[in-house]
Image (cartoon, helix red, strand yellow):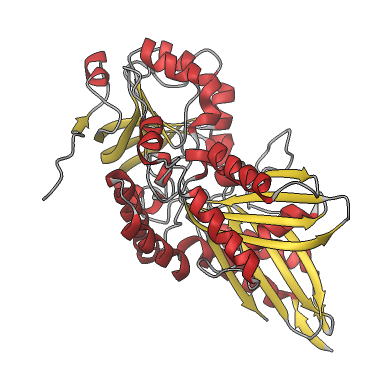
Amino acid sequence: MREIVAKKITETVKNLCIEANTNLSEDVVEALNKALSKEDSPIGREILRQLINNAKVAWRDKLPLCQDTGIVIVFFEIGQDARIIEGTLEEAVNEGVSRAYHDGYLRKSVVADPIKRKNTEDNTPAIIYTKIVPGESIKIQLLTKGGGAENCSALRMFNPNSPKEEIDDFVIEAVEKAGPNSCPPVIVGIGVGGSFDYAPVLAKKALLREVGRHHSEKDTANWEKELLEKINKTGIGPMGLGGRITALAVNIEKYPCHISSLPVAVNIECHAHRYKEAAI
Amino acid sequence: MVKKSKTKLQRLKPPLTDKDTNALRAGDKVLISGKIFVARDAAHRLFGKRPPFDPAGAILYYASPTPARRGKVIGSIGPTTATRMDPFTPNLLKLGLKLTIGKGERSPVVKAAIKKYKAAYLVVPGGTAAALSKHIKKSNIIAFPDLGPEAVLELEVADFPAIVAIDSKGGDLFEQGKKKYGIK
């Protein structure tokens, strides 16, 4: 049994929140540079150049990449031989979020009640997923998710006998509907299988995969490539002003499901993909 | 050979007139200097019949910045999705508002109002918030401070860059772009 003080989790969450918001990960920067070399539209190219420049300014001046510094979503993998002491996991995470959004000059974008809509003023609470795994360490995957792209997500319960083309059409439709509002070029997370509630979790988990790395299964990797090609034929382009690059990546995650079900969820992420991970 | 671009660079300084907005075409680049106002979802709900600023000839930017570091004017300030403000926009245009700035599409009703009131809608790329902050010279809260990040601001901007997306003649860069680059 390994003991981990809650304070350590607070500190890690705080650092990850600030880092995610000010330092655009290398895989995303690389994808933007690649997009720039492929884009035909002059406005599209100019926008991509502005995005790359923005990442440099944000890093240099310790400024958030985007004013929407998001709601914090954390995926934990907690070793079953680790024991959190001197506090609870949930309190530790929210304390880390609160400190990051205060000390890091990040925008507080969370309301306490979805109907009454009063700001909580410290960007808490975070959305926390936990999975118990073998071992004694804690893995933290943290995403700060903006509202614009998140609003463009979709879920559909397909007939298990539906041809795969129907799923493709549904994904394309979601991206087209999202259009300029989702801050393209986007990253498309797709969850296939599970249940009504689990498919969107898979779609979100799909966003955690490095941009440019495909699914380990060959069929699924090919499906990702096909979908990416189809999405980039829509012409939506950077910020929806027309162009060849509408998505930087399509990531699919799958899970077994019921014999009568085929749930598919699409979670859209803007180009300012703010994701970091750490292990304790 | 360098392909000659048909788009123009226009400099704008509010208050704007019909003449200013009528000269704008979808795809034009503009640089704005002077006073602009900032408001988004919650503030629009509280506007009632009139916003807490003079809309005549004014520019409204849909945004809410991150907090300013000590000694700085403002934090990062990029656009939010304009579409959510669609229900409120025709009334503001009727009152004389000339330009709205945001990201994303506008409804057919807003597009019709833009034509009717000789206005325009500009976009700035979402996710360029850090770079855009360099164009803000002054920032003051002018209404609803209780809304925190959603308070209404008056900004003094210098060479603030934007692209005309919808013009007063019905030009729509989103439609034009998709048509041009879409592959059937």
The answer to whether one can see residue A102 in this image is: no
Quick one: A212 or A25, which is closer to the camera?
Answer: A212
Q: Residue furthest left?
A: B1
Q: Residue A57's spot in the image, x, y percent?
A: 34, 60
Quadrant of the rendering where the N terminus of chain A is positioned:
bottom right
The answer to whether B117 appears left or right of A254 in the picture is: left
Vertical position of residue A251 compared to residue B42: above or below: below
**Quarter of the rendering containing residue A280:** bottom right
The answer to whether B26 appears left or right of A174 in the picture is: left
The answer to whether one can see residue B183 in this image is: yes
**Quarter of the rendering containing residue B162:** top left
The answer to whether B108 appears left or right of B147 in the picture is: left
Q: Residue furthest right?
A: A259
Vertical position of residue A202 compared to residue A112: above or below: below
Q: Residue B80's spot in the image, x, y percent?
A: 48, 39
Vertical position of residue B39 compared to residue B68: above or below: above
Quick one: B121 or B50, which is closer to the camera?
Answer: B121
Q: Residue B156's spot in the image, x, y percent?
A: 30, 36
Quick one: B103 or A171, which is closer to the camera?
Answer: A171
